[in-house]
Image: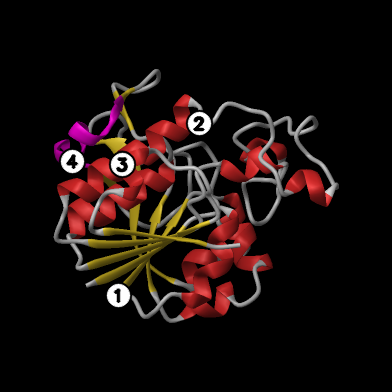
Amino acid sequence: MIINILLRGRSLSEFNTLGPADIIFLANDTDVEIQEVKGLKEYLLDKEINLVFNMVNKADKGYQAIGFFETFNVTKLVRPYIKGDRLPGTSGQSINLPDEFLGAHHKQFMYRGDKYTYEYPGTGIAGIAYAMLDYNPEVVNIVGLDFYDNLYYGESNYLVEDNAGRDYWTDLGELKTENPEVRAKRLDIPELDDWQYKIQNTLCDLVEYKPNIQVNLKTKCKVFIDRMRTISNLNIEEVE
């Protein structure tokens, strides 16, 4: 089995370089990307899709507006919470699929959270974890996971800019610049903050735990923790 995971970072633009897949994973509100990224809608039309989606009230309105669940073959709705932390049917969303929660086997890869006892550092990472731990495929291909590194160069984290709340730092005023010379250099900010470290570290934990799964990551990120470069079954391709 091959799983392609399409997240919303700027490297999502590489989706059309991925090979065939048995299942496509999407995370949270990718409805804007489906409408605006050239070729993405057509790419998804004949694919089986698993959607990893939070349970924020009415968060599905973007998907409903484009007829996502009627147009595409969405077979599973994965909730990024441990079973029991949220109750089925309490999202306030109108999605005609059962809520699939994370099993207890995910706990060892999660952090102690503020809102829930166990949390992944982001819905995208929860999707990667579900793909690897619950499907155990031979290959996982990932695009759109840039670890928020674009922000250090004055660029939005997301390929398609939407409302401010979608950015990890909602106020990018002091980071954005139109000067090409400045954009080519990393801004004077600490190398990796705690959230970025957690994302990379969790990915490493998962890949090391599943040495039988080849994980291929295409990313615009330029700075990695040491572990990212030493795992034999993790191939990283830095894209421009």
Q: Is residue 224 found left or right of 158 in the rendered image?
A: left
Q: Residue at x 19, y 54 (%)?
A: 134
Q: Residue at x 16, y 53 (%)?
A: 210
Alpha-carbon distance for marks 4 and 2? 30 Å
Q: SS for tag 1?
A: loop
Alpha-carbon distance for marks 3 and 2? 14 Å
Give amino acid for label 4: Gly
Give the number of the mark in front: 2 or 1. Answer: 2
In the rendered image, which quarter contains the N terminus? bottom left
Q: Residue at x 47, y 34 (%)?
A: 196
Q: Earlier in the sequence, mark 4 or mark 2?
A: 4
Residue 185: x percent and y percent?
A: 70, 43
Q: Are marks 4 and 3 in contact (CB under 8 Å)?
A: no
The label on residue 192 is: 2
Residue 4: x percent and y percent?
A: 37, 67
Give amino acid for label 3: Arg
Q: SS for tag 4?
A: loop
Query: Which contiguous range is marked in magenta?
Result: 102-111
Report the front residue among 236 and 17. Answer: 236
Q: SS for tag 3?
A: helix
**Residue lying furthest right:** 179
The label on residue 227 is: 3
Give amino acid for label 1: Asp
Q: Which residue is tagged 4?
A: 103
